[in-house]
C-alpha cells in the first residue's frame, strides 16, 4: 500500500469504484488485495453502494424455460429429457430498461429450476428444491463468478422423514455476517404442521449449520414461501391454526436474524382469511401483494410493525387493464411495478415485461423477453456492486 496515500483517503477513492475495477485493483499487490478484501473496506463499499440514491439501480432478470415434458422416476424425483435453461441478465432500471450484461449461470438443476431464496449486496442464495427432497443450497456472486455450496443441513428426509420447509437469507451489518435460516415442519395428523418447527441457521462466518430453539413459535410458514428481508428481519406469509374449528388466520411471520427470534406482523383485517398473497419490499417499507380472481391489490405498511398503518396503494384489474398479466415481480425505482406477462400459449417461448403506472392505470413501457415460460416464469432481484469478503478469496 502506498505510504503517500492515507488509508482513509484510499478507502474513499476505492469505495466509489465499480466491482470490475476493484477486482483489477486486487491484482496490484498483496497489500492492495488485503486492503480491498478486509471487512472494514467491504462494509464501506456496501454502505456507499446502498446510500447512493442518485445512481440508477440495476435489476437482475432471471428467465426460465421448460417444455413441460417431465417423467417421474419415483415419489420424490423427476427429470425431463428436454433441456432446461436459466438465463440471467442485468438491466438498467430506467425508461428504456436496456440490458447491459448477460451473466453465465454455472449451475444445472436436476429437478427443474433453482429457487432464489434472496439477494443482498450482489450475493444470491439459491436452492435446488423444487418439488423434491433435496438439500442443495448455493451462495452465488455473479459479479465475481464465485460460488459457495453450503454443507448439508441437519434436517433431511433420510433423518426425519417427510417434511416441508421454507428458507430466508439476510445480512447483519453489526456483526458483518450473512445467514441462511431454514424452518422445517415435520408431518403430523394435520399435514406438515408439527409445531414448534425445527430451525437451523447457516452462518457464512463459520461455514456451518447449527440448531436454533424455536421456543413457543407455533405459526405455520407457507411451503417455500418467498421472503422479504427488511430491517434485519426475514418475513414470510404464514398462518395460525384455530384448534377449535381448524380455521386459519393468515399473518406475516418474521424472524430476526441477529437475535434469532420469531415474531409476527399482522396483515390488514380484510386479508386475514385470504391465502394467495406474498410479501415484498418497496424501498424501506414492507409490502403485501394479494391476488384474488382477476384482481391484484398492492398494500404498503407505512410504519413498520404498526398494523393500522397498512394502506392499499392500488389495484390491478387483469380483465380491464392487463388481460395477459401473469404476476407482479418487482417495485421499480420510479414508483411503478414490473408485471410479467405471457401470450397464453402453453408452448410459447416468448413473453414480455410491462412497467405498470399505478397513477394512470396503464402500462407505459413494454419489453419483449425471449424464452419466457409460463412453467416457471421470471424472477427479478436487485443487482448490487459489492465485494463479498467470503467469496472473493
Image (cartoon, rainbow, N blue to C red):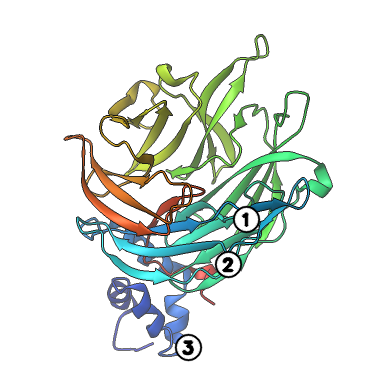
Crowding at label 3, few (<14), some or many (≥20) Cα neighbours within 10 Å? few
Answer with left or right where residue 264 lies relative to residue 290: right
**In the rendered structure, are the residues bearing label 2 and label 1 in contact, judged by CB atoms less than 8 Å apart?**
yes
- In the figure, 218 relative to 283: above or below? above
**Which residue occupies the extreme left position in the image?**
360
The residues bearing labels 1 and 3 have C-alpha atoms spaced at a distance of 37 Å
**In the rendered structure, are the residues bearing label 1 and label 3 in contact, judged by CB atoms less than 8 Å apart?**
no
Q: Position of residue 234 (x, y in %)?
A: 50, 42
Query: Is residue 173 at all visible to an observer of this figure?
Result: no
The residues bearing labels 2 and 1 have C-alpha atoms spaced at a distance of 10 Å
Indicate the secondary structure of the residue bearing disc 1: loop
Question: Which of the labelled discs sits on residue 128, or is there none?
Answer: 1
Q: Position of residue 140 (x, y in %)?
A: 53, 65
Q: Nearer the viewer, mark 2 or mark 3?
A: 2
How many marks the image carries: the answer is 3
- Going from the N terminus, do you reach mark 2 or mark 1 first? 2
Indicate the secondary structure of the residue bearing disc 3: helix
- In the figure, 313 relative to 4: above or below? above
- Going from the N terminus, do you reach mark 2 or mark 3 first? 3
The residues bearing labels 2 and 3 have C-alpha atoms spaced at a distance of 31 Å
Answer with left or right where residue 5 lies relative to residue 104: left
Residue tagged 3: 30
User: Can you tell which quarter of the image residue 102 is in?
Assistant: bottom left
Crowding at label 2, few (<14), some or many (≥20) Cα neighbours within 10 Å? few
- Give the residue drawn at x 83%, y 49%: 158
Task: Identify which residue, 176 or 102, lies in the foreground.
Answer: 102
Q: Nearer the viewer, mark 1 or mark 3?
A: 1
User: Can you tell which quarter of the image residue 101 is in?
Assistant: bottom left
Residue tagged 2: 107
Answer with left or right where residue 178 lies relative to residue 190: left
Amino acid at each position: 500500500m502506498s505510504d503517500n496515500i492515507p488509508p482513509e483517503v484510499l478507502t474513499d477513492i476505492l469505495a466509489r469504484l465499480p466491482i470490475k475495477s476493484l477486482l483489477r485493483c486486487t491484482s496490484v499487490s498483496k497489500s492492495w488485495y488485503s486492503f480491498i478484501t478486509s471487512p472494514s473496506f467491504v462494509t464501506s463499499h456496501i454502505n456507499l453502494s446502498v446510500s447512493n440514491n442518485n445512481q440508477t439501480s440495476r435489476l437482475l432478470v432471471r428467465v426460465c424455460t421448460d417444455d413441460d415434458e417431465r417423467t417421474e422416476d419415483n415419489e420424490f424425483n423427476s427429470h425431463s429429457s428436454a433441456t432446461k435453461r436459466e438465463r440471467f441478465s442485468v438491466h438498467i432500471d430506467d425508461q428504456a430498461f436496456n440490458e447491459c450484461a448477460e451473466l453465465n449461470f454455472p449451475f444445472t438443476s436436476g429437478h427443474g429450476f433453482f429457487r432464489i431464496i434472496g439477494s443482498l449486496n450482489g450475493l444470491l442464495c439459491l436452492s435446488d428444491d423444487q418439488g423434491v427432497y433435496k438439500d442443495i443450497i448455493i451462495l452465488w456472486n455473479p459479479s465475481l463468478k464465485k460460488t459457495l455450496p453450503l454443507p448439508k443441513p441437519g434436517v433431511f428426509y433420510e433423518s426425519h422423514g417427510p417434511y416441508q420447509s421454507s428458507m430466508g437469507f439476510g445480512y447483519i451489518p453489526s456483526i458483518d455476517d450473512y445467514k441462511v435460516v431454514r424452518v422445517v415442519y415435520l408431518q403430523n395428523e394435520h399435514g406438515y404442521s408439527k409445531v414448534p418447527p425445527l430451525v437451523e441457521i447457516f452462518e457464512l462466518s463459520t461455514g456451518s449449520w447449527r440448531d436454533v430453539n424455536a421456543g413457543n413459535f407455533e405459526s405455520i410458514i407457507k411451503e417455500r414461501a418467498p421472503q422479504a428481508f427488511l430491517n434485519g428481519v426475514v418475513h414470510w406469509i404464514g398462518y395460525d391454526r384455530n384448534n377449535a374449528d381448524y380455521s386459519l388466520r393468515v399473518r406475516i411471520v418474521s424472524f430476526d436474524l441477529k437475535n434469532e427470534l420469531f415474531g409476527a406482523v399482522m396483515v390488514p383485517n380484510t386479508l386475514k382469511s385470504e391465502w394467495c398473497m406474498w410479501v415484498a419490499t418497496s424501498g424501506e417499507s414492507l409490502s403485501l401483494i394479494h391476488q384474488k380472481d382477476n384482481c391484484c391489490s398492492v398494500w404498503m405498511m407505512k410504519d413498520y410493525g404498526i398494523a393500522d398503518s397498512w394502506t392499499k396503494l392500488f389495484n390491478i384489474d387483469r380483465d380491464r387493464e392487463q388481460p395477459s398479466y401473469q404476476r407482479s415481480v418487482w417495485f421499480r425505482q420510479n414508483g411503478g411495478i414490473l408485471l410479467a406477462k405471457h401470450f397464453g400459449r402453453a408452448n410459447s417461448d416468448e413473453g414480455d415485461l410491462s412497467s405498470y403506472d399505478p397513477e394512470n392505470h396503464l402500462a407505459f413501457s413494454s419489453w419483449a423477453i425471449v424464452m419466457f415460460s409460463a412453467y416457471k416464469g421470471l424472477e427479478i432481484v436487485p443487482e448490487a456492486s459489492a465485494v463479498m469478503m467470503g467469496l472473493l478469496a
